[in-house]
């Protein structure tokens, strides 16, 4: 049984593809920001190893959240509840919920992992809130653009296209 085939494979491919892109962007921005804080210029922060560690940590968090929190479905339900019939408008709304959940989860958990022992809760929150607005805005734009690409890739790899699947029966 191939784990990349069927509906489950579709979800794995979308989640993996989007997490590769998002976690690379999150890692670069956070490491660049921290490297350029006064006093950090000479420290080995934004290095290949630093990027690798940051990427792996954020990817693990992103994969877990993406597999266990149906954020895109929540966004689609919100668009439906708002009676948005336009596909583009519905995409903007569903991706807003997806970005809010994914970027918030990944960025906060990774900030907590990397800071709580040294900076405590207050310092961790301060570090997170320093980078969060940019991460959320850029994450939204990247997800808005890349999610359709990820879905097309996932449909090709998995052999499953949810837009062509029958609607599930109501229980």
Image: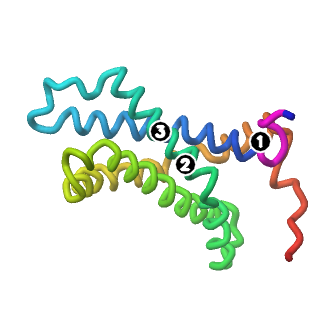
In the rendered view, tell whether residue 153 sits above or below residue 66: above
**Which numbered marker is on residue 143?**
2
Residue under pointer 1 = 9
Residue at x 84%, y 44% (from the top left corner): 6
> Upstream in the sequence, badge 2 or badge 1?
1
Q: Quadrant of the N terminus?
A: top right
Marks counted in the figure total: 3
Return the x and y of residue 90 as percentages of the image width and height.
64, 65
Point out the frontmost of discs 2 and 1.
Answer: 1
Magenta region: which residues?
A: 2-8
Please identify the quarter of the rendering in which residue 34 is found: top left
Return the x and y of residue 35 as percentages of the image width and height.
21, 32
Residue furthest top as drawn:
48
Residue furthest front as drawn:
117
Return the x and y of residue 62 as percentages of the image width and height.
52, 46
**Which numbered marker is on residue 92?**
none
> Upstream in the sequence, badge 3 or badge 1?
1
């Amino acid at each position: 049984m191939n784990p990349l085939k069927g509906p489950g494979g579709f979800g794995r491919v979308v989640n993996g593809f989007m997490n590769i892109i998002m976690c690379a962007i999150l890692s670069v921005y956070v490491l660049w920001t921290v490297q350029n804080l006064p006093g950090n210029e000479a420290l080995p922060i934004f290095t290949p190893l630093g990027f690798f560690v940051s990427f792996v940590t954020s990817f693990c968090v992103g994969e877990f959240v993406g597999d266990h929190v149906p954020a895109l479905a929540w966004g689609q339900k919100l668009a439906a509840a708002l009676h948005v019939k336009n596909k583009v408008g519905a995409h903007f709304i569903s991706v807003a919920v997806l970005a809010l959940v994914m970027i918030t989860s990944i960025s906060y958990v990774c900030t907590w992992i990397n800071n709580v022992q040294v900076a405590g809760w207050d310092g961790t929150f301060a570090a997170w809130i320093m980078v969060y607005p940019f991460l959320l805005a850029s994450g939204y734009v990247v997800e808005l653009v890349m999610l359709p690409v990820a879905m097309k890739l996932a449909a090709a790899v998995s052999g499953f296209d949810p837009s062509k699947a029958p609607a599930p029966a109501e229980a």
